[in-house]
Image (cartoon, rainbow, N blue to C red):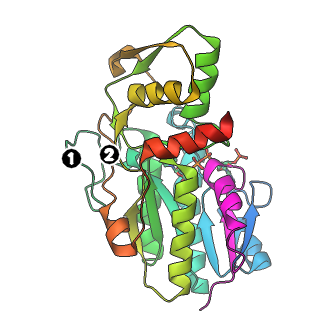
Amino acid sequence: MAIHKVLVTGANGQLGWELAQAAVSFPAFEFVFVDRNAMDLSNPSEFEVVIALFAPDAIINTAAYTAVDKAETERELAHTINAEAVAQLAKIAKQKNIPFITYSTDYVFNGNATRPYLTDTILAPVNFYGKTKADGEQMALAENPATIIIRTSWVFSSHGNNFVKTMMRLMKDKDALNIVGDQIGRPTYAKDLALATIQIIKALNEGKSIKGIYHYANTGETTWFGFAEKIKALAGLTCNLTAISTAQFPTPAKRPTYSVLDTQKIENELGITIPNWETALKQCIDQLT
Ligand SMILES: NC(=O)c1ccc[n+]([C@@H]2O[C@H](COP(=O)([O-])OP(=O)(O)OC[C@H]3O[C@@H](n4cnc5c(N)ncnc54)[C@H](OP(=O)(O)O)[C@@H]3O)[C@@H](O)[C@H]2O)c1
């Protein structure tokens, strides 16, 4: 079935917003963006009515419960949004025989690896947010094996809440900051992920069979400290940065130490070229300054 209308949840999130910016360059598709007022993911029983109203040819679910620390205590809500809602969207997409794309996280892995995680590496989340996302993946695939799941990591954008914007604000306000230097991952510019997602929609529209789990993150890897150093340099800030250990920065939710996603599958199978994280960061900071 040809894809014309694409329904996107999470209109005000980083990825939802970047998809809306990118969508204008793809007029062949009609993207319809819904926020939590139009479609509340904590109410999966309402989805059928909302989706019938829009009658999309594909669904992209960027909405999620992303407050990693708060998820430790708001467990029921986090699980409904990140797991039950995702399974329900997958089920409806199957009934309607339309593609369904949703996103997951590096936090589904245990963080103890020493080489990048493959799409089929065993899941062992170290916090409750990671568990909700892992459950969402498995429940969605059980409902609808054609579900497309894109795991990503360390997402930033000129829009919304993220490490880049927080660091720029703090570095302007303070003379010195301590940043965790022993967690390793791959930052991801939501704009690049949005463009990759639209490439997938185009490929599906051309009849390519795409399903299952993929990883997408900008190339290269760093620590939060390394990320902060680069933000500082690109934004021309002068704050003094010190690398500290995870143990010196306790958080309600445990964080994985090694979070590097292997993205070869999406690059090789779908021919998607992924920009380097430092190039992507420069683009984002240019937008912010
Ligand atoms: N951010 C990261 O570092 C990161 C890392 C790995 C994976 N991911 C995954 O990547 C995807 C996109 O993340 P993102 O960074 O774009 O997230 P984000 O900026 O936090 O946006 C999440 C969006 O979900 C919406 N939302 C939350 N609860 C909702 C509900 N009950 N009903 C409807 N919408 C609701 C929020 O709405 P409001 O604007 O109204 O609050 C927000 O617009 C998510 O699946 C996330 O889990 C993100």
Q: Which one is nearer the viewer's eye here, 102 or 26?
A: 26
Compared with residue 90, is residue 72 higher up or lower down, i.e. above or below?
above
The residue under label 2 is which amino acid type? Val
Instruction: Quote the CA–CA distance across marks 1 and 2.
Output: 7 Å
- Which mark is first along the chain, 2 or 1? 1
SS class, disc 1: loop
Report if residue 257 lies within the magenta region: no
Q: Is residue 128 left or right of residue 199?
A: left
CB atoms of marks 1 and 2 within 8 Å: yes
Q: Position of residue 44 (x, y in %)?
A: 65, 63
- The quadrant of the picture occupied by the N terminus is bottom right
Range of the magenta residues? 1-28
Residue 43 in sight in this render: no
The residue nearer to you, when weighing 261 against 82, is: 261
Q: Residue furthest top?
A: 175
Please give left or right for residue 31 compared with residue 247 in the image.
right
Q: Amino acid at mark 1?
A: Arg
Residue count near mark 2 (Cα–Cα under 10 Å), binned few <14, some 14–19, many ≥20: many
Q: Position of residue 21 (x, y in %)?
A: 70, 58
Q: Nearer the viewer, residue 277 or 150?
A: 277
How many marks the image carries: the answer is 2
Q: Which residue is mark 1?
A: 115
- Residue visible at 59% across and 10% down in the picture: 174
Q: Residue at x 41, y 54 (%)?
A: 134
Residue 11 belongs to the span the image colors magenta: yes
Q: Quadrant of residue 86?
A: bottom right
Q: Which residue is mark 2?
A: 260
Q: Can you name the residue that lies furthest to the left here?
A: 114
Going by the image, does 67 lie left or right of 112? Answer: right
Q: Judging from the image, what secondary structure is the residue with disc 2 in?
A: loop
Dot 1, crowdedness within 10 Å: few (<14), some or many (≥20)? few
Please tell me in which quadrant of the rendered image residue 246 appears: top left
